[in-house]
Image (cartoon, rainbow, N blue to C red):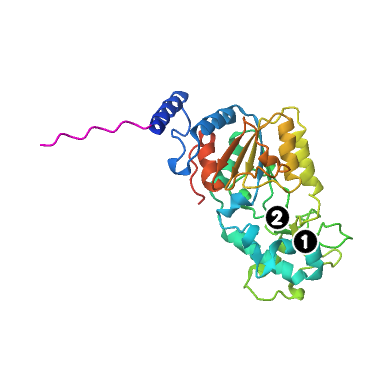
Amino acid sequence: MLAPAPNPKPTAHEKALLTLQNKQSRRKAKSGQLPLPSLNIPLEAYTSFTTHLHSSTRILALLGAGLSAASGIPTFRGPGGLWREHNATDLARSEAFYKNPSLVWQFYNERRRAALAAKPNRGHVALAELARVKGGFLAVSQNIDGLSERAGHESGKLVAVHGSLHEVRCSGRVCGGRGCSGEECKGRGCCLKECEFRREIMEGMLEGAEPDFALERIPVCPVCGALLRPAIVWFGEPIPEESRERVHDWLDEVEKVDLMLVVGTSAVVFPAAAYIHAARVQGARVAVFNVEEPSKEDQENPVTRLRDEDWFFKGNAAEVLPEVLKEIVGVVKSYD
């Protein structure tokens, strides 16, 4: 009869896991478990980050297209940045709208349809929960899809600085971009979700998928008669003053920022880079979540200038972010 094979000795990695699990048990960690091994999250980085996260009272998050990519929202960047043979970035300009408003409306109508068909991912849900449990939290989103809002992110802790696919505003100079005169909107720019005055427009835009978007189908401003346009901040346009002031007022509060989260963005577009710099000036440590590591050659990108006390978590933000935040928010389930 053969003797049973001896149990193999634990590897150094397994020993490190056991040590950290014991430490976590003594801390009575809310999640009760470490990150999934398949995500290859460095354990030392995880424990140092969660320790700082626990103690942080003021957290600023910058959200980019990489957060929504896992929900099926195209980023329109890089080799795949084409829409029907058009360069998507060329359509995101006021010049494109004045040259061919039908084409631009069709482009954004399809993006709106895709956003409404998509679901928030676990990254959106984790950030919404972090906003709920951390009083001094603000997310500055560069996304226009509305998925953070649908995930339950508190509106007072979220600033969509690039606008929304689900709103329109006037393209004429007379109105100054205010758009809808409906009583519910009060000149702030029509919200297609809430205003009965424009609800028919939304329903009409989403019906069918015509190859051509006729000029006469584009809604017009009830005040001055100019064409309405998507309430998006296009290339070359400034961030709306209200959004800019909300972020600046938050940064100007007496208590300093402890932690800056950079999620799914390279932060190369202004004012995203400026927000990271502002947080760091106040003493914030920076944690970056992205599928690609920052380029060491690009010294102008603030994300590349990570210091020894900062963190970089490589991977899909929808998977990595919930794992790293679960010490605070608990285990995040998929959006229903």
Q: Is residue 88 left or right of residue 221?
A: left
Task: Tell me if residue 140 can be seen.
Answer: yes
Q: Nearer the viewer, residue 230 or 206?
A: 230
The image quarter in which residue 22 lies? top left
Q: Quadrant of residue 302?
A: top right
**102 versus 34 height, above or below:** below
Mark 1 crowdedness (10 Å alpha carbons): few <14, some 14-19, many ≥20 = some
Q: Position of residue 168 (x, y in %)?
A: 75, 60
Residue 197 placement: quadrant: bottom right
Prevailing SS of the magenta stretch: loop
- Reading the image, the residue beneath label 1 is 93
Region of the chain picked out in magenta, as a range: 1-11
Of 5 and 297, the residue lying toward us: 297
Horizontal placement of 174 versus 51: left or right? right
Q: Secondary structure at mark 1?
A: loop
Q: Residue furthest front?
A: 297
Name the residue at 57% across, 29% down.
54
Q: Please, is residue 72 above or below residue 308 in the view?
A: below
Q: Residue 149 location, x and y as percent?
A: 63, 49
As for residue 197 lying within the magenta part, the answer is no
Residue 258 shows which numbered tag? Answer: none
Residue drawn 72% across the image and 61% down it? 89
User: In which quadrant is the N terminus drawn?
Assistant: top left
**Residue nearest the observer in this picture, 58 or 295:** 295
Q: CA distance from mark 2 to mark 1?
A: 15 Å
Q: Which residue is mark 2?
A: 164
Three-letter amino acid code of the residue under disc 2: Ser
- At label 2, counting other C-alpha atoms closer than 10 Å, the crowd grade (few under 14, some 14-19, many 20 or more) is some
